[in-house]
């Protein structure tokens, strides 16, 4: 347990920040999961919107420091390849 006033405050701040980061990460994972489901179903109309949503969420996570930029770039690249494969098929 923290003894100093500043350390006690930081514990509260860290707890709040952790919750926000978990929410952001969860929202991003949900967007990616929805995109993958749309790709599997073969819905060409909604795949572009779902990809934009997933990409936007990943970029937001990078800007907020939730995930590393290379991780986001890798995920976006792989999702984009799947979307392109669906669109050309």
Image (cartoon, grey):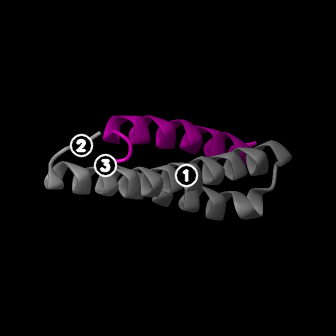
Which residues are the magenta region?
65-89
Residue 50 drawn above or below residue 71: below
Looking at marks 2 and 3 on the same chain, the residue that comes earlier in the sequence is marked by 2
Residue behind mark 2 = 2
Q: Which corner quadrant holds the C terminus?
A: top right
Residue behind mark 3 = 65
Tag 3, which secondary structure? loop
> Do the residues bearing badges 1 and 2 touch, measured as CB atoms within 8 Å?
no
- Which dot marks residue 28? 1
The kind of secondary structure the magenta stretch mainly shows is helix
Q: Residues within 10 Å of mark 2 (few under 14, many from 20)?
A: few
Looking at marks 3 and 1 on the same chain, the residue that comes earlier in the sequence is marked by 1
What whole-number distance in Å separates the C-alpha atoms at marks 1 and 2? 33 Å
Q: Which residue is drawn at 65% across and 51% down?
A: 30
Q: Residue at x 57, y 50 (%)?
A: 26
* 41 displayed left or right of 47: right
Residue 82 falls in image quadrant: top right
Looking at marks 1 and 2 on the same chain, the residue that comes earlier in the sequence is marked by 2
Residue 32 on the magenta segment: no
Residue 59 falls in image quadrant: bottom left
């Amino acid at each position: 347990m923290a003894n100093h006033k500043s350390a006690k405050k930081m514990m509260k701040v860290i707890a709040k920040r952790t919750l926000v980061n978990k929410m952001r990460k969860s929202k991003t994972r949900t967007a990616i999961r929805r995109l993958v489901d749309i790709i599997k179903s073969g819905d060409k109309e909604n795949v572009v919107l779902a990809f934009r949503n997933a990409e936007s969420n990943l970029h937001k996570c990078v800007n907020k420091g939730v995930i590393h930029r290379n991780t986001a770039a890798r995920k976006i690249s792989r999702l984009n390849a799947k979307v392109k494969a669906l669109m050309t098929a």
